[in-house]
Image: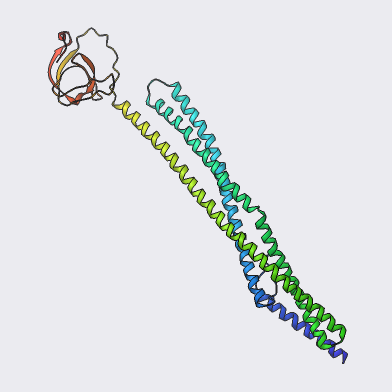
Amino acid sequence: MDALRKQASKLREQVAKQQQAVIKQFSGTGYESSDVMVIDEVEMQRHQQLEKLYRSTRAGKDFQKEVLRAAEAFTAIGYKHIEAGTKLSEDCSRYGAENTNDKILAKGASIYGDARKHVEKEQEDFNKLLSSQILDPLRAMIAGAPLEDARHLAQRYSRMRQEAETQAVEVSRRQARVRELPNPENVAKLQAAEAKMKELKANMAVLGIEASAALAAVEAQQQRLTFQRLVALVEGEKTYHLRVAAILGEVEAEMVSEKQRKESAPPMIPQENSSEKTMYFLAEATHSFSAASEKELSLSVGDYVVVRKVSPSGWSEGECKGKGGWFPSAYVEKRQRLPASDLDAEVY
């Protein structure tokens, strides 16, 4: 008879273990991929909530690390940009200073070299923004105590849950023993096991609420802070690129203007020492022209000009009303030709 009881007890224990294995299989994974048994409906909901929050905060932390790595890369590239840009600025300025023979390239190099200093200043300001607005806040959040404390609470709850699972097995075993042999000793052991189980469930309820609240608060802070840092990154990049574009736009306009001025300016004609007579001609102004420099000659419609030189660039040099200078050739029409020796008075 005793042998039959023992065999029946073993059979019941095997069935209980198989049931627990099935429950574990369908109860989901724990916070760190650990299988745990669902004790009741309330505990299952709390476990699912904690598991969701745990995964969410872990994903948020991983994303913060990705943003941090990107910002660190931007900063490193920025410092290399500053180093290369500063060197280029110095080279351009030196070339412009050493070639001051009124050549367009030297002037353009000087303009660009000065502008690059402002570009590198903008890059330096952007690097400072990355450090203060992105890197420092994210590092503080990733390594911060609130996140780690909340995750430790969740891990404590997970361990307590596993302890409750073990205790549930013990209660089941004690119940089977009492059914098999309901003596005072077995009953007392069953009551002790049930009391411990009750205490564990109560502690789990308190710890679960505390861990859920802590993780929910951290998740909200994590989401808010990370979004703010992303907005700051976008605004910082936008401001940086707009300012650099404005600087380069001004440089381009100045260089193009300088090029046009050089191309349209009256040519520099060397003095001729030839003793041969130079043939001048008389012309009448058909368009008004306002001189933009001392080298140029202002004209009004109807003025007569003694033209002394015509340049292939479209400019002519002559004298009108006692003043000499350059003016556009297309603004006058030829009237008569005369030798330079015949020019002995001002033309009106």
Query: In the rendering, at what x and y percent does residue 3 appear?
Result: 87, 89
Q: Identify which residue, 291 or 198, lies in the foreground.
A: 198
Q: How is the image coloured?
A: rainbow
122 vs 18: above or below: above
Query: In the rendering, at what x and y percent does residue 180 appear?
Result: 83, 88
Q: Residue at the far bottom: name it.
A: 1
145 vs 315: above or below: below
* Corner quadrant of residue 337: top left
Numbered disc total: 0
Query: In the rendering, at what x and y percent does residue 71 appear?
Result: 56, 47
Q: Identify which residue, 309 or 212, lies in the foreground.
A: 212
Q: Taking 311 as reference, is 124 left or right? A: right
8 vs 302: above or below: below
* Corner quadrant of residue 64: bottom right
Q: Residue at the far top: name it.
A: 275
- Residue 77 in view in this figure: no
- Quadrant location, the C terminus: top left
Query: In the rendering, at what x and y percent does residue 329 appear?
Result: 20, 24
Which residue does the image show at 45% across and 22% down from the upper left? 97
Q: Taking 172 as reference, is 311 left or right? A: left
Which residue does the image show at 22% across and 21% down from the upper left? 298
* Corner quadrant of residue 191: bottom right
